[in-house]
Image (cartoon, helix red, strand yellow):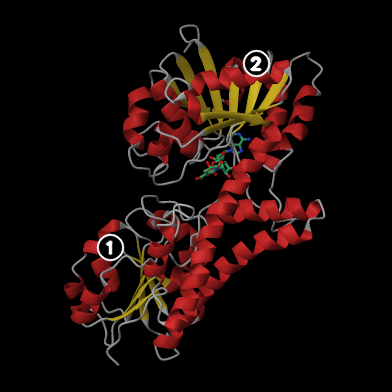
Amino acid sequence: MSGAKFSKNILCIGAGYVGGPTMAVIAAKCPQYKVTVVDINAARINAWNSDNLPIYEPGLLDVVKQARGRNLFFSTDVDSAIKEAQIIFVSVNTPTKTFGEGAGKAADLQYWELTARNIVKVASSDKIIIEKSTLPVKTAEAMGRILNANEKGIKFEVLSNPEFLAEGTAIEDLERPDRVLIGSQLTPEGIKARDEVVEIYANWVPGEKILTSNIWSSELSKLVANAFLAQRISSINSISALCEKTDANVSEVSRAIGMDTRIGSKFLSSSVGFGGSCFQKDILNLVYICQSYGLTEVADYWERVVLMNEYQKRRFVQNMLKVMFNTVAGKRIALFGFAFKADTGDTRESPAIDVAKQLIEEHAKVVITDPQALHNAKIDLADYADKIEFAADPYEAAKGAHAIAVMTEWKEYKTLDYKRIFSSMERPSFIFDGRNILNHEELFKTGFNVFPLGQPNHKHF
Ligand SMILES: NC(=O)c1ccc[n+]([C@@H]2O[C@H](COP(=O)([O-])OP(=O)(O)OC[C@H]3O[C@@H](n4cnc5c(N)ncnc54)[C@H](O)[C@@H]3O)[C@@H](O)[C@H]2O)c1
């Protein structure tokens, strides 16, 4: 399809949780642009071209259908798409490095750098390259060097436009963002490129919500936003442990502190711990950057957020063990939910992975149910396939179980028929509510022994 009838050719490299939804919204909002999304993973691209999208996200299919084939295209032909584009968003994965210097903390930039090198090799005209992936501060400098070392006389301007969407609410977040951040060099070329990208978002985002900044602030802001969000979860989770010792109720504490406008009420629910592909990786990346600048105290401060999260996951299983008479060996335990949060099928870094593994090590018979994440759960736990059962139906999962542990705050778990579930379980029957979403009094009256997080428990013995 020729790009001539479109006013801009926009490309996104990487058709994942960020690239797919972000470009679908740009295409839906801006029919005047041609938006192409490419990936080296052909199965993913095929799925984007079908009605069975590769990721579950409320409202996403409608947005994709609105634009796909009109001005939104998914393809594996990376090179042709690079040639044609004036503006290239790069949204490839940037996981934690697992090898060599910085292993376990630093960001693995190999996919980003390979993409940059490929752009240089294939391009035949000037381009704006946008960091959509989350990257360490100062990456744009290295990328600029790689890109502009070409001998073809082509100029590349590197910008930073980090993505703040949250999985589960991606479409809403993209359609009505709290803010869009665009960082650039403050040179005339940098500002010109920045204004071109501002123009894209201005098609639907109010001007006052489009922030511009220097490129290093933009790169760093994304890491800091995730560090602050995760810090709130670790903070309230640390208090949940203290509540359990003191008969205080963490939900009451959250409500009381959250009404303070200086604190705010969001991200104050205690849970088994934060998950998702970003929080841990981005904090560790921040820690690594601080360490590499010799800021040991700053690095240690942020590392505690991750360590507290590990503690909370461990503590959850230790509590299950203690309550279930110090052994779960041979006991069937149903995990309600495996996704790292509700409304997504994403299980990356889900606390349920650690909980399942710890329970298997204790020789429990683990059964997992989830409305969207069973496919990913099977991949995550492939090494334990003979020790785990998967059940699409929560009633089936709970049948014959000694305990249920709520891992994900899916709203359907609030309205299950727990009397029916109770009648199918072993006695004594336990519920560990790792999200504090169930009606604990009701469950207790039904006969369950109920163990919320950071709240007084309700037990019959
Ligand atoms: N998932 C989120 O909620 C979220 C939110 C904000 C920012 N981010 C950041 O966005 C980036 C992407 O995250 P994601 O969750 O979309 O990752 P993802 O793993 O779902 O998607 C990345 C895609 O890039 C593709 N890819 C890798 N190398 C490629 C190459 N050379 N050419 C073409 N395609 C290539 C992969 O095949 C994959 O499909 C990360 O840096 C992440 O930190 C993620």
Q: Position of residue 224 (x, y in %)?
A: 62, 48
> Which residue is under mark 2?
192
- Side of 437 relative to 293 (left or right): left
Q: Nearer the viewer, residue 231 or 200?
A: 231
- Side of 461 relative to 95 (left or right): left
Looking at the rendered image, the quarter that the C terminus falls into is: bottom left
| Mark linked to residue 413 | 1
Q: Nearer the viewer, residue 321 or 120?
A: 321
- Front disc: 2 or 1: 2
Q: Position of residue 401 (x, y in %)?
A: 30, 78
Which amino acid, by three-letter code, is at mark 1?
Tyr
Residue 17 appears in the picture as rendered: yes
Q: Residue at x 38, y 57 (%)?
A: 374
Q: Count of labels shown?
A: 2
Which amino acid, by three-letter code, is at mark 2?
Lys
Q: From what the image shows, is residue 102 above or below residue 326? A: above
Residue 393 appears in the picture as rendered: no
For label 1, the SS is helix
Q: Residue at x 27, y 79 (%)?
A: 400
Q: From what the image shows, is residue 38 above or below residue 137? A: above
Q: Quadrant of residue 251?
A: bottom left
| Mark linked to residue 370 | none
